[in-house]
Amino acid sequence: MKLSQLFLLSSILVSVPSIGHAEEASWKDTSLSAEARAKALVKAMTQDEKLQLVASQYAVDNGSKHLPIPKGALGSAAYVAGIPRLGIPAQQITDAGLGVTNPNHIRPNDAATSLPSGQILSGTFDRNLAYEAGKMTGAEAFHRGFNVLLGGGMVLTRDPRIGRNFEYLGEDPILAGNIGAEQIKGVQSQHVVSTAKHLAFNNIETNRKKIDMKVGEKEGRESDLLAFEIAIKKGNPGSIMCAYNKVNGDYSCENSYLLQLPKKEWGYQGYIMTDWGAGHSTVKAANAGLDQESAADQFDNKIYFGKDLKEAIAKGEVPQSRLDDMAYRVLYGLIQVGAYDHPAVKSTQSEDVAAHEAISQKVAENGIVLLQNKQNILPLAATVKNIAIIGGKADKGVLSGGGSSQVTARGGNITDPTSMQTWPGPASYFPSSPMKAIQALAPKAKIQFAEGNNIDEAVKLASQSDVVIIFATKWSAESFDNADMSLPGNQNLLIEAVAKAGKPVIVVLETGNPVEMPWLNNVDAVVEAWYPGTSGGTAIANILFGKVNPSGRLTITWPKSLAQVPYPKITNAGQRWNEDDPVKEDKPDLSGIKTFSLDVDKANVGYRWYQDKKITPLYPFGYGLSYSTFKYNKITLNNNLSGKNPTMTAEVTVENTGNKDGADAVQVYGTIPDGTTSRLLGFDKVALKAGETKTVSIPLALQAIANYEPKAHHWELPAGTYTIAVKPDALSNEGVKTTVHINKMNLAD
Ligand code: BGC
């Protein structure tokens, strides 16, 4: 059966949470479950109060409609007034997954900590760090009086041009789902609702508000939807944000298949809100399962979940039970994270900035990837005498990604006057200068800087130095994709020319995606620092000088060129809108790209595509160097493959065979019986002193090697012999392996 048919079949109305004979004000009773309390509240609410909860208002005056910011709003992506008589707090809703944003500086002088980009967070392969990262952003949100955070994101990375890859967690569903779940838990530990976004298949930004993503049910469940399934089941986010794009003909925010999947199949009790401008209907959306319309006053063509919803209920087009369910879900989300019992109030206390910045720095230090290190040129010695630093505004700061996730750093962002000046721009640098941090680590070194615009000047500087560090940047942002994989401007020519000066050359990349590196063989070391966050300069310097041993891994396969990717041509990619109002994105003619079919890579996203097609990329998923070396000595399995919940755990013995303390991202892969692809089943980040050996126990996710069977509606592990291997990256032949025979079995949902 096709997914589109299933959409029709699954367009089931949500049952009303049955409200028992709760005692008066039982919703205040913290000994009761969030379910019981939310039900009691709904029972006590008037129709207008329920309607009030299901539509937010924009809370930034961006000038385009000159709507006043609602009274009581702090100034942020959206606001819903509270209901004081029932103790329901206002919803103060802010972006985003990397940190608390301040669009248009709506809250004067309010700066925050930005985490490094999602590729770094996932590249840590460290669940604890993901939790700490979420906890830090949650704490900053709560401190400012916000109780809903619009992040994190777990859309899978399917192409190296996509504008928002930096907000997401890479190409593997097991990694993205698990890291996303920990981030969500961390945010919510601070009484702030976390929002898993964007459901679903928001895999490209080009024409994102109109494009129809085509995907089969099996392929969808085994890829992007598996990442969401894991993040939602394990992280239990208070809210989910449905995407702009259509999926198989229906807009995500009125797509009953997508909206019912978490609720019907994953036990999800929270609410689903639209993206800003992703609402398209009243009756269809409400009956499909949408729970809250976001900032419709500014972004949708009309307010669908206001007067129109009230009338639709009165006419019986939307059952009353659906509105009760919407209100229930919003309240459940708030109650279960403690936002009801611990209302967020803008704090007058100072926050622990140093601790927050330390977490951002730690994430960067654990997720930045060392790609190349010929003759162990890195780490640099603190005694190096003459250092040339070239390009990338490294004297000033580090690049960040653009759009709604853009954080304003303490000390102010440094904007690039040559970039687009209107939303999602301008390209902004956080004031954490790698050059200053390098000088602090090599206090006696003579450090000279060249901007890099003048190639001759840069070559001259390089030839006078002992070592050259070139910073190369490429800006990515929400709402458009890059046209290609090249470094913009003269940067490739600059690197080629400087490499000819005969000095050791280290290239540090600050990019939102893999880039082509035509000069790769001519330089000594390459560090991919992605967008390293508000303490990124320090993290980069610490890695270059060995204060930190790099342990980050790639969470996106790095192709040699676009000729290797599943979708070499993306029509209209690179076309952008020079407008400050995202609603106007619809205006340019992007008619060349109306649909996008994911039927090339299907569920074989990223490294699985390369394996299946026997293509050797430049660097595979999971790849990254260290200043130490690691060896896997043994893998054994503990299996319990009977009963409803079969489990498999790998015991892996890993040894640090080098002479430096470090950490290894231990990755366990399972090859399916036909031998075509191996899939990440489990991972852990293990710190090992030089010479140390540890045995770690890694639970394996059987869904990664199971088939989703749409007709039977379940996950099935086909009979056969599976190879389970621990290896340094997804495509490596090194490491150790074992096999396990599995009889055909179904996995319980
Ligand atoms: C983005 C969302 C964001 C929202 C609110 C939209 O443009 O797609 O991710 O949360 O704006 O700012």
Image (spheres, helix red, strand yellow):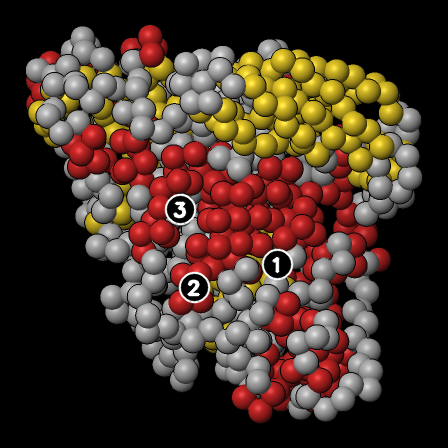
Q: Give the residue displayed 79% in from the left and 75% down from the top.
A: 17
Q: Amino acid at mark 3?
A: Ile
Secondary structure, mark 3, is helix
**How many marks can you see?**
3
Residue 369 point in image, percent of width and height? 41, 27
3 or 1: tag closer to the N-terminus: 1
The reply, left or right, for residue 166 in relation to residue 201 is left
Q: Give the residue displayed 65% in from the left and 82% down from the top.
A: 28
Vertical side of 60 occupied by 222: above or below: above
Secondary structure, mark 1, is loop
Q: Amino acid at mark 1?
A: Pro
How far separated are the C-alphas under marks 3 and 1?
Answer: 22 Å
Q: Which residue is mark 2?
A: 141
Q: Which mark is residue 359?
A: 3
Residue 625 point in image, percent of width and height? 44, 20
In-front residue for pair 351/400: 351
Q: Residues within 10 Å of mark 2 (few under 14, many from 20)?
A: many
- Classify residue 524 by image quadrant: top left
Q: Which residue is mark 1?
A: 237
- Contact, CB < 8 Å: mark 3 with mark 1? no
- Classify residue 603 by image quadrant: top right
How far separated are the C-alphas under marks 2 and 3?
Answer: 15 Å
